[in-house]
Image (spheres, rainbow, N blue to C red):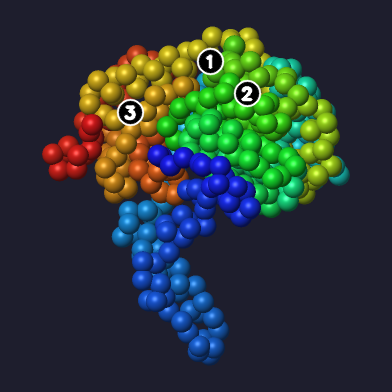
Amino acid sequence: MSHSVSAEAARRACDTAVVVNRHSPEADHAVTASPHPTTEPVRTDRSDHGAWVFDWLDVRSGARTRAGLRRRLVPRSAGAEVLDLAGNDYLGLSRDPRVVAAAAEAARRWGAGATGSRLVTGNITAHTELEGELAEFCGMQSALIFSSGYLANLGVLGALGGPGTLLVADAYNHASLVDGARLSRSAALSVPHRDVTAMATALRDRRHKRAVVVTDSVFSVDGDLAPLGGISAACREHGAALLIDDAHGLGVLGSGGRGAAEAAGLAGRPDVVITATLSKSLGAQGGVVLGPQRVIDHLVDTARTFVFDTGLAPASVGAAAAALAVLRAEPGLAGTVVRRAETLAGRLRAAGLAVSEPAGAVLSIRAPSAADALSWAARCRTAGVAVGCFRPPSVPDHVSRLRLTVRADLTEEDLDRAVRVVVASAPNPTTTGGRT
Ligand SMILES: Cc1ncc(COP(=O)(O)O)c(C=O)c1O
């Protein structure tokens, strides 16, 4: 993105209380709307008991089909016949026998579900123990577990935001941060990707009492890293809090996988809050907010996705705790992931593909169109390699991509196979201009 934020633009945007970026209602509409909205059926007949009320969905899905934007649910096999470069199990722990056994043991002890909100019947000692371990591991004062990373982001933004707060957000932030900003009823400003100057300008010119800068650490599409040091300096200078979504950094970056904030020297700072998921490098399920004790206390009282949600299932808590123990015992896992990603990116680039610069486990390859990305991913799948296919609205700049992830347990042979298949399956450069 090339646009920058002038002081006046920042002020205007601050006044409008909307987030303008790829997840804006406008963007959603562009993807889901019929190109010919007037062709949507309007019926006044009430005699057929509502048989037509969802006809408009067929018009929308037809438009998505023509644009190559239909989604299909493909079951993942329980076996390992397909080389998985699409999942987020970065350390290969979701099937680790220690992790699986801990999940089973927790379910046996506490039951299949948490049975209620943590504030009613759903709180178990395993929750609080895991919170203590996560906080200690990441170097943060306190932690609170949510039932997903998505809900952790909605919860923390709702609790820290509101009408008196300006949220300054990187334009490439994850959808859960965008949705959290919207739900929080804060004034919100989307600034160009990784643009510290734009963030500082927005903070300097704000009329709001409070401000929070919101950013992914490792961005989920290209896998590039936020300039956390510069962002944090801008926050300090302008009296703003910093919220870092470390979903792709925990277990991968920092010493022994302690995360991107630790790597940037920001762990334990009084003005920093971190969110993360337990469903990526920890191989389990759930989300967490880490931060100063008073922030966590505030979340327990006010975060709606904590208060009104059933507590995280015991099996997931047990699995995440066991995965964290593995990570402590084998701190080299984190660095291995990063090296695997660098190797894979380098080899794909050498083959002529347009590959991003991965900071952690995630990398992407640009495709000429949504339809090309889809058929490219399908050819890889047929050849036994599962890759992600990201198309609008999941891509910030509307450029469709293959998205590849690596795991610490990938072998040299796995990497060779991945490169061979992805390159051989690429769209024909003479017809599509797919390679750069
Ligand atoms: C950056 C980021 N934040 C949050 C989430 C949501 O985490 P969860 O899958 O635990 O809801 C994801 C997951 O894809 C993510 O990539």
Task: Give the structural element (helix, strand or loop) at label 1.
Answer: helix
Residue 233: which disc? 2
Q: Nearer the viewer, mark 1 or mark 2?
A: 2
Q: Which residue is mark 3?
A: 355
Q: Residues within 10 Å of mark 1 (few under 14, many from 20)?
A: many
Nearest the eye: 317 or 45: 45
Around disc 3, counting alpha carbons within 10 Å, would you say few (fewer than 14), some (14 to 19), or many (20 or more)? many
Q: Secondary structure at mark 3?
A: loop
The single residue placed furthest to the right in the displayed view is 120
In the picture, the quarter occupied by the C terminus is top left
**Position of residue 52 measured from the top left corner of the image (x, y, whole percent):** 48, 79
Q: Is residue 168 visible?
A: yes
Question: Is 290 situated left or right of 424 in this image?
Answer: right
* Pointers 3 and 1 in contact (C-beta within 8 Å): no
Q: Whole-Å distance between the Cαs marked 3 and 1?
A: 22 Å
Asked whether mark 3 and ligand 1 are closer than 8 Å, the reply comes as no
Residue 349, x across and y down, in percent = 28, 23
Q: What residue do we see at 73% from left, 51% from top?
A: 163
**Which mark sits nearer the N-terminus, 3 or 1?**
1
Query: For this rendering, which residue is in front, 162 or 217?
Result: 162
